[in-house]
Image: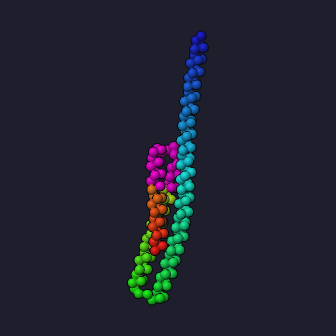
Amino acid sequence: MLVLVLGTLLTVRLVTTTRAWERTAADWEDLARTHGTQLAQAQTDLEAAHAELADTQTQLATAQQRITELADEKARLGDTTASQQQLADYQARVSQAAGQVATALANCIDGQERLIGYLRESDRYDAADLERFATDVDRVCGAATDANASLQRELDR
């Protein structure tokens, strides 16, 4: 009789422990899926930022070439000092806007690369901290997009 009671108690304890481990494993699996999804999104965002940076660098090179061409044209035509000043002002505005875009995109890429690193080792960080950092990276990348839009408006003038 005592063996039957002890056997029953041991069986109940093993079933309870097994269910607890199953719940814990499911929680970890959910967490891993969540972080995997975040990592995939961060990598996609990083690739997009790299592509946008390449496009912006191409646009910057084109704009600088065009500025140089315009400066040469103006010099050949012997325009007035006022026209040359306007061109210099335009070049300064475009150069400043292009510098801001390049800096903003570099900051965005740096943030995304750091976020990817954190997500790869997400078990070492607090989930709320990771979420806040991801939000900060999104804000920085939004600023880069805004800076690029500003450059495009300046180039269209």
Q: Residue furthest top?
A: 1
Residue 57 visible? The answer is yes
Q: How many marks?
A: 0
- Quick check: is 101 in the magenta stretch? no
In the depicted view, which residue is nearer to us: 7 or 130? 130
- Which residue is drawn at the image coordinates 56% and 43% (left, top)? 33
The answer to whether residue 3 is above or below residue 85 is above
**Relative vertical location of residue 36 with respect to residue 47 in this rendering, above or below:** above
Q: Is residue 71 above or below residue 55?
A: below
Q: Main secondary structure of the magenta part?
A: helix
Please, which colouring scheme is shown? rainbow
In the rendered image, residue 124 lying in the magenta stretch gets the answer yes
**Residue drawn at x 44%, y 49% as measured from the top left:** 132
The part of the image, by quadrant, that contains residue 88 is bottom left
Is 37 on the left or on the right of 104, as rendered?
right
x and y, in percent, of residue 125 in the image: 48, 45
Name the spot of residue 69 as percent of width and height, x first.
51, 81
Residue 25 place in picture, x, y as percent: 57, 35
Q: Nearer the viewer, residue 26 or 90?
A: 90
Residue 101 visible here: no
Q: Residue at x 48, y 65 (%)?
A: 148
Residue situated furthest left in the rendering: 82
Q: Position of residue 151 (x, y in %)?
A: 46, 69
Q: Residue at x 42, y 75 (%)?
A: 92
Instruction: Specify the segment rendered in magenta.
Output: 112-138
Quarter placement of the N terminus: top right
Frontmost residue, 152 versus 143: 152
